[in-house]
Amino acid sequence: MKNLILRILKEQLEGVGENPLSEKEVRMFKYVNKLKPTLKTQKEFFDLFKTLMKMVGRPESDYRFYYEVYTANYRPEGDYENLNKRDFVHYRSFKQRRTPNNSAYEYSAAKLPFRGSNLEGFWDINENNDWYYVVTSYDWYPIYLFINNQWYRVSNSYSSSTAKHLSGANPMRRMTYDPNIKDNIISVTPDEIKAIRNGRPMETIKANRVRDFMSNDGRNILTIPTRMISIGWGNDKKKVKFTVTDIKEKNGKIHFNIRIDKAGTVEGTNRMVVNPEGYVVPSPFSEDIENGIKQRLLMDYSDNLKEDNTEFKFQHPQK
C-alpha cells in the first residue's frame, strides 16, 4: 500500500511531458551509447561515468547515480531527448540494492535505495509532500537525511554498531566540496533529524536550540560559573580560569559575558605560570585564550550551542 501511495504522489508531484533529463545529460547518455559496445565490465562503465561528471557539472562521486539512471532508462536508439516524465524510470522508485555495510556510502552518496545489514537507504515523502532520502539504522533510527538539497547527520550514535553504520553509509566519504550542496552536511540531534524529516523548518530547529539552552544548560552554567581548562598542547599549552558572569538571549542569539580570572602558560607537571605583568590585549596569547574558551563551551553543549547562534564578550585581567 505504501508503494502505491508513493507512486500516486510521484505522478501528482512530477506530472508528465517535460524531459526530466537536462540537455547536458541527454548528450552524455548519447555519448555513452556510442561507447557501450566497447565497455565489457561494470567497472569500465563506472570509470567512464567518473570522467563524464564534469560534463554535467557534478562531482565525481555522482558517477554511481548516473550509471544507475542510465541503465534504468537505456534507449538503444539513443533518443534520450524524447523521454518524458511518465516514461522516465525515476531514481526515487529504484528497488533497493543489497550491499555490504562498508560499501553503503556508494549508494548514499548517489542517493540510491539500498539495503545492508540492519542498514538501509530509501526515498519517502513527508506530510508536506517533500521528497527526502533517509538512511536508517535498525529500521527506525535515521542517521543521514537529504531534504531540500541539504544533507543532515545525526550527532549521537548511541551504540558502537550504529557508529559503524554512520561510517559505512557516510555520503561524504568520497566527496570533496560540492557547490551544489549547501554547507556539505549539518550535524543535528536525534530529535532534530526526526523533526526535519517530518517537515519541520530549520529556522524552527535553530530557535528551539536557543530556547532549550536558556531553559536548561544556561541556568546550570550560572550556578557554578567558574571553570579551569587547558588549551592547546605541547609547548603551546595554556591554562585559563574563567567565570561566566552572565548569559542572555538577544535577537535569537545566546550572548555570553566571560571574565578571565587568570591565564598563563603550562610548565612541568601541568602547572600554570602566570605572567605577573599580565598580557597584551589583543595579542596572539589573548586570542588563543578567547578561542579556547569559546570552542570548549561549543563542544560541551554542542546539541544547542553553534557558531551561528552564539556571541562572546570577554573581560581580560588588568595589568
Image: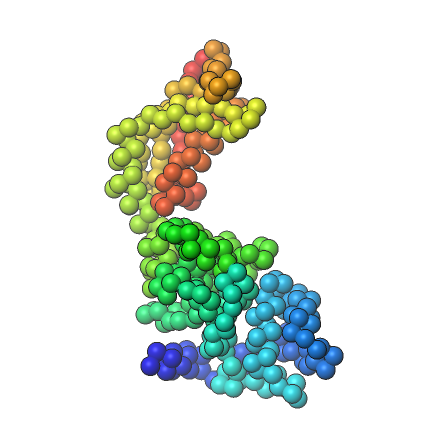
Q: Please give the name of the residue rendered at 55% of the width and 61% of the height, measured from the top-left corner.
A: 180
- In depth, the one of 13 and 111 nearer the eye is 111
- In the current view of this chain or complex, which residue is farthest to the bottom? 77
| Horizontal side of residue 65 vs 293, given as left or right | right
Residue 184 location (% of width, % of height): 51, 55
- In depth, the one of 170 and 32 nearer the eye is 170
The quarter of the displayed image where residue 309 is located? top left
Residue 133 location (% of width, % of height): 44, 67
Q: Please give the name of the residue rendered at 39% of the width and 36% of the height, measured from the top-left corner.
A: 297
Residue 312, compared with residue 205, is above or below; it is above
- In depth, the one of 253 and 291 nearer the eye is 291
* Quadrant into which the C terminus falls: top left
Q: Please give the name of the residue rendered at 33% of the width and 59% of the height, measured from the top-left corner.
A: 195
State the scheme by which the image is colored.
Answer: rainbow
* Quadrant into which the N terminus falls: bottom left
Would residue 52 be visible to someone looking at this image?
A: no
Residue 125 location (% of width, % of height): 38, 71
Residue 247 location (% of width, % of height): 31, 34
- In the current view of this chain or complex, which residue is farthest to the top? 276
Would residue 54 be visible to someone looking at this image?
A: yes
| Count of numbered tags | 0
| Horizontal side of residue 132 vs 26, given as left or right | left
Q: Please give the name of the residue rendered at 25% of the width and 30% of the height, measured from the top-left corner.
A: 223
| Horizontal side of residue 7 vs 40, given as left or right | left
Residue 301, compared with residue 40, is above or below; it is above
